[in-house]
Image (cartoon, grey):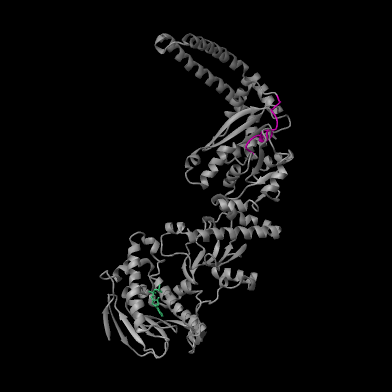
Amino acid sequence: MQKGNIGVTTENIFPVIKKFLYSDHEIFLRELISNAVDATQKLKTLVSKGEYNGELGDLTVRVALGKDTITVSDRGIGLTAGEIDKYINQIAFSGANDFLEKYKEDANAIIGHFGLGFYSAFMVAKRVEIISKSWQEGATAVKWSCEGSPEFTLEETQKEDRGTDIVLYIDDECKEFLEESRITQLLKKYCSFLPVPIAFGKKKEWKEGKQVETGEDNVINETSPLWTRKPSELKDEDYQKFYRDLYPMSDDPLFWIHLNVDYPFHLTGVLYFPRVKSNVELNRNKIQLYCNQVYVTDTVEGIVPDFLTLLHGVLDSPDIPLNVSRSYLQSDSNVKKISTYITKKVSDRLLSIFKNDRAQFEEKWKDLKIFIHYGMLTQEDFYDRAKEFALFTDTEGKHYTLEEYKTLIKDGQTDKDGNLIYLYAQRKEEQYSYIEAARNKGYNVLLMDGQLDIAVVGLLEQKLEKSRFTRVDSDVIDNLIVKEEPQTEALEEGKREVLSTLFKSQLPKMEKTEFTVTAQPLGETASPVVVTQSEYMRRMKELADIQAGMAFYGEMPDMYNLVLNSDHRLVKSILAGQEEACADAIAPLQQELDGVNARHEELRKQAEGKKDGEVPQADKDEKQELEKRRDDLKQRKETVYADYASKNKVVRQLIDLALLQNGMLKGEALDNFVKRSVELI
Ligand code: ADP
């Protein structure tokens, strides 16, 4: 028997391995089974090269549970004593040393991704044995044994079959790995698609109310999963079935893309566009990353562009470095190429569906657009491709490409400064009357009801020249697209102010909501009162919900404009009624106010051009007194108007109708409105 010391510099490496990889102990099984699969594949290679002419026999890799052992057996190339010395005693240990070196920089990056290989067995075992017989003729079987210290023993042993058994004597702290269900779960997770059959015990069946083993191997994997096969041999149903196997609870996918490259890197895989239910949190980490059919991780951030992490499916590449940190990954040139390649493939596929089957593309647009929008917003090169097939949908449900839409509205929706005005609504029902008004004017209105539409609107304004997006209720209809200077006669300022005071006094109080009341001539047939909301502030607030760093806007109140149509007969009659009803009360106040204003102006003129010190104190005091007086008089005037307005049911009714049209009349205000309406009828 040979005894020896494993050549490592670190005194005892195993406790370190155990500690650092605590959370990911389970990968030991993946590592051992991939070694077994590798050994089997190597044997097949020897056969194909004519170097091995013996019987291959059954090449199934077997996992077996004992009372306190797990054994992984293969019938691959096996190891000679010399090879064990070389590959296990020397090389593998230097690998573990590398691990420790790398750990210093970034522990998280390594855990679960670093191929610790064979030695990961010591994360769960107190003793590990390798019993192996090489494929070479006349090879003697050997047994290597090690208890997790740098000492090992290596001796000859008896073994019938070619291949290797790795026997793990499971640590007391890791008993969970002796449970059948836990092993089944791990095999499912890591080994489902390995290229060599993996058997875990025998298949079971129900007999007389009991589960009994059959004679048949319980093979847990699919050796040639869909992504390794040729697209030309696959049918739609195959892709759908594979999708259901991967995500049993999901609806059918919208589309899929089969990836297959050999140069300048190796990558295969299938990506699916899932059907997302609106308002459901988008699910990242649904793409599984494989390395030669061995499952590695479901975190693909850094490998595929951010927006594509929303897709589902499988990527398999031996060229993605896994034993490095994520930040390093992003600067790796292979990974960059892979990411660019995937983006290009995805956009090519979308473009080809769009071109070849536009009807299908339009039908799925509603589900697709969140991905496409996200890509356009975050990935410049994707935007450049997507602008060909990204669609606008109008309020009638018609779809247009950006170019088609531009042509559609060019004549009717260009303003006097040559800007193309895109009108949109976000909620078809709530903004109905504004949409109608715009359509009656011959405008087309887009429906922008997607989660990212507002952000896309901002992006398009940057990308498209001389183009502006404005929501249908952002202004009164005549001002949405200003084609010429306004010609109607505006009301004189004093009257505008009175109207505004009257209406302002009757606005119901609403939380975090502010109104500006203005009067404008909108034509006799237009609505008497309209609520509008300026595009800019509203959009900033909406963006604050989806973008970081805009919380400031999120905190601002909602700002609305209540626009009174001074051409409308109801508004006119309110103004006339006010003049009659308030004249007596207003006249003396106004007279006094005029006097105060005149004296104030006189004092101001006297002080003009003088330094502060040169103005007599008495003048300053008087001026201050006058200002107080003026405020007081204004206040009293406002009270008179408010008093009138409060008795004038039409004022309240008009306000409420305008609010109602916007879905803003709620609670007590709505109740009052209904009661008042009944009275008026
Ligand atoms: P890696 O697999 O990354 O090379 P490991 O530590 O897992 O590192 O294994 C070291 C070497 O031991 C392997 O490269 C292989 O030559 C050999 N080896 C491990 N397991 C087996 C096995 N089941 N059959 C044959 N050789 C094996």
Q: Residue furthest left?
A: 11
Instruction: From the viewer's perspective, tell me whether residue 479 is left or right of residue 208.
Output: right
Residue 125 forms part of the magenta stretch? no
In this rendering, the answer to whether 552 lies above or below 35 is above
Choose top left, top right, bottom left or bottom right for residue 531.
top right
Q: In the displayed structure, would residue 239 be above or below residue 628? A: below
Q: Quadrant of the N terminus?
A: bottom left
Name the residue at the front extreme: 50
Quarter assignment of residue 538? top right
**Magenta highlight range:** 473-488
Q: Is residue 250 left or right of residue 421?
A: left
Q: Is residue 263 above or below residue 488?
A: below
Where residue 244 sits: x, y (%)? 57, 69
Given residues 228 and 636, the one toward you in this image is 228
Magenta: main secondary structure: loop
Residue 458 on image: x %, y %: 58, 43
When the figure is inspected, residue 285 is found, relative to residue 654, above or below; the finding is below
444 sits to left or right of 508: right
Res. 253 visible in picture: no
> Which residue is depicted at the point 36% across and 89% down?
140
Of residue 349 and residue 54, the one placed in the foreground of this image is 54
Does the stretch in magenta take in 484?
yes
Q: Nearer the viewer, residue 440 or 260?
A: 260
The x, y position of residue 515, in whole percent, is: 57, 33
Q: Is residue 312 visible in this depiction of the protein? A: yes
Q: Quadrant of ligand 1?
A: bottom left
Which residue occupies the foreground of this view, 537 or 305?
305
Residue beneath the point at 27% across and 69% down: 9
Q: How many marks?
A: 0
Quarter holding the C terminus is: top right
